Image: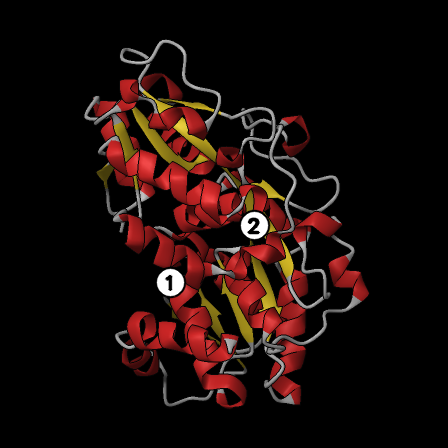
Amino acid sequence: MRRRSLTRIATVAAAGLLFPLLSACSSEPADLVIYSGRNENLVKPLIEKLEEELDAKVEVRYGGSAELSAQLLEEGGKTEAGLFFSQDAGALGALATEGLLAPLPKTTLDKVGPSHRGAGGDWVGTSGRVRVLAYHPGKVQTPPDSVHDLVKPEWKGKIGYAPANASFQSFVTGMRVLEGDEATRTWLKGLKANQPKAYDNNLNVLAAVDSGEVSLGLINHYYWYEKAAEEGADKQTAKIHYLPDGDPGGLVNVAGVGVLKAADKKQAEYAQKAAAFFLSDEAQQYFAEETKEYPLTAGMKPAEGVPSLDSLQSPQIDLGKLESLKETLEMLQDVGLV
């Protein structure tokens, strides 16, 4: 059964995570416990604003989205969490599939479009990111328009990627949904044959492209814009290319939140208010200006220089179907890319 298979992920992915999370607990009980797959450096200021908004004590336990999702599956009805704040729609979809998320009110769900929330009304996207190709213009005059081109011999030894990153794994899952397992496995084998260089994270991939260590890199768009905001766009050698024509390499994924069905009445109330807060104008503006992600609520615009979501030719996909992480990890392991 799916629960058993996903639970096995917990023994691998969450075994080293459980005790650090528990050690984060304080003696004073929290009004709301959040399991956050979002990086603390990115969202801590927003969590502080949330505490002020709720006038409540919020405890956050940070980890990888996949690991936290696996842990929540393991904990089931005994979890202390009231809210799951995921970097990735797939991790939320895994919990929704197992019936662990509570329904969100229509007033919360309707703040974003149907493509950016769970089909069952139990999770909602809070910000978006797009997969792009980073490239070194001194080495690449015209970047390819499809990830399928990356298996051509001309790119051998010239590609950087972050195999352990949730966004890369979600992109592979998206390709499986869009094009099927056989086509995805064939592509992965071709990529492996081209000897891509693995890095710990997207920032390191971008740095490798910027220095010319690799010619191309698979990253999310906001890493480039954050670096440009810190150092100046004119100081960036690397450029980014948005893939056209619904290419699977141009996947738009979302971070999002879901309220745990096991939460008691008091914590559930705070969790529902927190979900609404992350879709407030204040929070959406934070995602746009501070993290350079895409705000998802109507009327909110991305940061200056970031193309609008409407202008992109991203693939059309049900983000809830990105929940099959286990199968993606097995495929990546079989091919030898992780």
* Element type where label 1 sits in the image: loop
Disc number at residue 254? 2
Q: Amino acid at mark 2?
A: Val
The residue under the point 60% across, 25% down is 245
Q: Is residue 128 visible?
A: no
Q: Position of residue 74 (x, y in %)?
A: 44, 82
The residue under the point 78% across, 56% down is 110
Front residue of 95 and 293? 95
From the viewer's perspective, is 21 left or right of 283? Answer: left
Crowding at dot 2, Cα within 10 Å, few <14 / some 14-19 / many 20+, comes out as many
Q: Which residue is mark 1?
A: 64
Crowding at dot 1, Cα within 10 Å, few <14 / some 14-19 / many 20+, comes out as many
Residue 333, by quadrant, is bottom left
- The residues tagged by marks 1 and 2 sit, at their Cα atoms, a distance apart of 15 Å
The residue under the point 47% across, 77% down is 72
Give above or below for 310 relative to 329.
above
* Element type where label 2 sits in the image: strand
Kindly give the residue lying farthest to the front in the view shown: 182
N-terminal of the two: label 1 or label 2? 1
Count of numbered circles on the image: 2
Q: Are marks 1 and 2 in contact (CB under 8 Å)?
A: no
From the viewer's perspective, is 336 left or right of 329? Answer: left
Front residue of 257 and 67? 67
Q: Amino acid at mark 1?
A: Gly
From the viewer's perspective, is 321 left or right of 69? Answer: right
Q: Position of residue 131 (x, y in %)?
A: 47, 36
Give above or below for 233 relative to 72.
above
